Image (tube, rainbow, N blue to C red):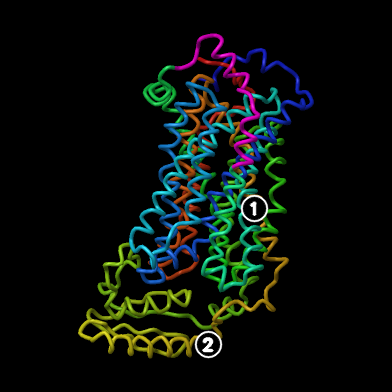
Amino acid sequence: MAYNATHGAGAKAQPRPMTPQERRVIVASSLGTVFEWYDFYLYGSLAAIIARQFFSMLDAGSAFIFALLAFAAGFIVRPFGALVFGRLGDMIGRKYTFLVTILIMGLSTFIVGILPTYASIGVAAPVILIGLRMLQGLALGGEYGGAATYVAEHAPHGKRGAYTSWIQTTATLGLFLSLLVILGVRTVLGEQAFTDWGWRLPFLLSIVLLGVSVWIRMTLSESPAFQKMKAEGKVSRAPVSESFGQWRNLRIVLLALVGLTAGQAVVWYTGQLYALFFLTQQLKVDAVTANLLTAAALLIGTPFFVVFGTLSDKVGRKPIIMLGCVLAALTYFPVFQALTEAANPDLAAAQARSKVVIVADPGECSFQFNPTGTSRFTSSCDVARQVLAASSVSYDLETAAPGATAFVRIGRTEIASFPLKGLSTEQARARDAEFRKTVARVLAEDGYPAKADPGKMNKPLMVAILAYLVILVTMVYGPIAAMLVELFPTRIRYTSMSLPYHIGNGWFGGLLPTMSFAIVAQTGNMYSGLWYPIVIAGATAVIGILFLPETREVDIYAND
């Protein structure tokens, strides 16, 4: 295996300055990948609008969660893309494989921009949308392994962490670019026009970026490591079976997943996507302000990808990545509580002063997720939870006698809920409107704000907190490409490193927003969704510290 390989001539070479050819490889690979991430994250940045346009047949809470689930669909298929394109990359070369991936990504994104909504073509709209997301996921599954492998195989010994860290910036820069384009279009058109049709423009713009990206990729030559291997006749004929059919390599694949990429993934998505959703959905910060502050934090934090990638060439990959996971697991709860106090101090004060409780028979409280739109929440407990969830109000559950009608307690005021069963549509609508009006009035009287007050926000502190979350991302993500490349031999590197990366990021990370908000919907506590990344990051830290090898001194040209 590569991490046990005898250090060859490459390992003995002294670090040297970057050549013009190496600089061109990094710039070309990074720019193309930035555009691909831009395409991929447009959907995530516009999840709330996507929910209204394509999942309007569902209730508001389920529509948003299902929109996130459709977002996650692109991540779920990423490992399959890793297998398909990883195999091609190890057999025919790095360059041509990630040229194909960017074509698939760009065309799928453009089609989203012209796709009719649910109001126009019914259920076909979300079905086609999910299909396009899956195509994007397949393409992205082949993209990262190709770009990371390509750059690493051009890098001199002693600088692989620094060189590949530029690839690591691309996901953040792609998200940053998507936020800037969305903000620009939103500002020019106005909120109403943007919500109605202007949201399509950032997707349509991707066709221009696709043309630029394809031209950039066409200028590249094949990596020297692959050329050397091909000249020696050592190209693998069955990279999938070699990667996962032999225990000595499969063991490292599994270790890379649970001891490295799973924790890295949840830290990444918590810091760069969940934090944005938390601001808008839970703290009621307006979308423009949330995007601007997130963009500022990304701008501050992004250089640290290169800082930590370069540092990993000196102190090792493992200590930096594991420290990032540990810090995330230990600090997420206090950090997000501090974000609440900075972004919406009225909400934080109301939660501390006037606790909200639903007192209900637990047997009447259903799981608050309705992805198909076929279930109806009819019990008095479910009615109360739906109303509070729609207001983004955290609450606790207390047990009432079996069969008792649920009620909401806000401070010292109790408001009786009601079951929908037995009511006509008109009666149910009238009772629901009256109940919502009463709850809203009592919440307002107890200081619960309808939205965050921009005049009371501590924006410098918000940016500092968001930047801290991004810096945690850079710790776990900056050195990881070099480490994954170094774990596996050249002949099966593309395939072997791509699968654990994309299972970790596609499944553990991509499902994070959906899982976290489902946990919040079920428990009623807006912080409870953080348990998902905390548990996974903590587990990765333990497994990685105990079992993961350090790799920075290996010879990546080794094929045994």
Q: Report the front residue among 284 and 426.
A: 426
Residue 28 falls in which quadrant of the image?
top right
Marks 1/2 in contact by CB < 8 Å: the verdict is no
Q: Give the residues in magenta.
A: 211-236
Q: Position of residue 522 (x, y in %)?
A: 38, 67
Rendered residue at 73%/25% (across/down): 21
Answer whether residue 227 is magenta in the image: yes
Rendered residue at 59%/68% (across/down): 287
Name the element at disc 1. Answer: helix
Q: Report the front residue among 168 and 359.
A: 168
Q: Position of residue 456 (x, y in %)?
A: 68, 78
Q: Which residue is mark 1?
A: 177
Rendered residue at 53%/60% (across/down): 200
Q: Is residue 519 visible?
A: no
Mark 1 is on which residue type? Leu
Q: Please name the predominant secondary structure of the magenta segment in the image.
A: helix
Rendered residue at 60%/19% (across/down): 225
**In the figure, is residue 125 to the left or right of 229?**
left
Q: Residue 444 — which label?
A: 2
Q: Report the front residue among 280 and 147.
A: 147
Q: Which callout, 1 or 2, points at the residue further toward the start of the chain?
A: 1
Q: Report the front residue among 171 and 553.
A: 171
